[in-house]
């Protein structure tokens, strides 16, 4: 009985290992793309993602503690990207993108809420 159970478990582990090894890999994200004037960049994003407010009057820094709206559209447009700000994680751990929420409020979205590769987006 022990040999049978051991053989079944070994076969199950082997089949799981083979299944994991042959599973398809995730496809690379498509790049954000500019509009015809290069002012707005269109990116695929998470529907309902929060848009955070701005610290100060110069529109330079995201306020990670204040949500000013949400982005339900997808794709959505963004003005520019800003690196070196509050931690957001993901492949660009300190990147935020300036946009306008669906309610018309100017703010920033975390890079982790955007499926597209944001490297092509111009710097703020």
Image (cartoon, grey):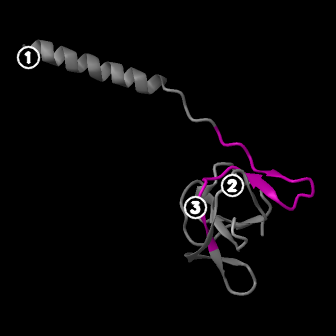
Q: Give the residue drawn at x 71%, y 54%.
A: 118
Q: Relative to 54, does residue 108 appear above or below in the rendering?
A: above
Q: Relative to 96, does residue 75 appear above or below in the rendering?
A: above
How far separated are the C-alphas under marks 3 and 1?
Answer: 50 Å
How far separated are the C-alphas under marks 3 and 2?
Answer: 24 Å
Q: Earlier in the sequence, mark 1 or mark 2?
A: 1
Q: Nearer the viewer, mark 3 or mark 2?
A: 2
Q: Earlier in the sequence, mark 3 or mark 2?
A: 2
Q: Which mark is residue 73?
A: 2
Q: Relative to 61, does residue 43 appear above or below in the rendering?
A: above
Mark 3 Cα-neighbour bin, 10 Å: few <14, some 14–19, many ≥20 = some
Point out the image quarter for the N terminus: top left
Which residue is under mark 1? Answer: 2
Residue 53 picture location, percent across and down: 64, 76
Q: Which residues are magenta?
A: 28-52
Residue 36 picture location, percent across and down: 92, 53
Q: Which mark is residue 72?
A: none
Q: Nearer the viewer, residue 89 or 106?
A: 106
Q: Which mark is residue 93?
A: 3
Q: Give the residue drawn at x 41%, y 22%.
A: 19
Q: Relative to 21, does residue 66 appear above or below in the rendering?
A: below
Q: Nearer the viewer, residue 61 or 104?
A: 104
Is residue 120 visible in this depiction of the protein? no
Is residue 57 a member of the stretch shown in magenta? Answer: no
Residue 84 picture location, percent across and down: 64, 70
Q: Nearer the viewer, residue 72 or 41?
A: 72
């Amino acid at each position: 009985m022990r040999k049978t159970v051991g053989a079944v478990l070994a076969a199950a582990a082997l089949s799981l290992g083979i299944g994991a090894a042959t599973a398809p890999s995730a496809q690379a994200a498509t790049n954000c793309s500019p509009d015809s004037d290069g002012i707005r960049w269109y990116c695929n994003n998470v529907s309902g993602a929060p848009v955070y407010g701005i610290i100060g009057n110069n529109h330079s820094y995201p306020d990670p503690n204040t949500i000013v709206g949400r982005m339900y559209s997808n794709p959505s447009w963004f003005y520019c990207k800003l690196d070196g700000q509050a931690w957001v994680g993901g492949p660009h751990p300190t990147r935020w993108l300036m946009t306008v929420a669906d309610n018309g409020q100017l703010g920033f979205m975390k890079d982790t809420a955007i499926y597209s590769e944001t490297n092509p987006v111009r710097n703020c």
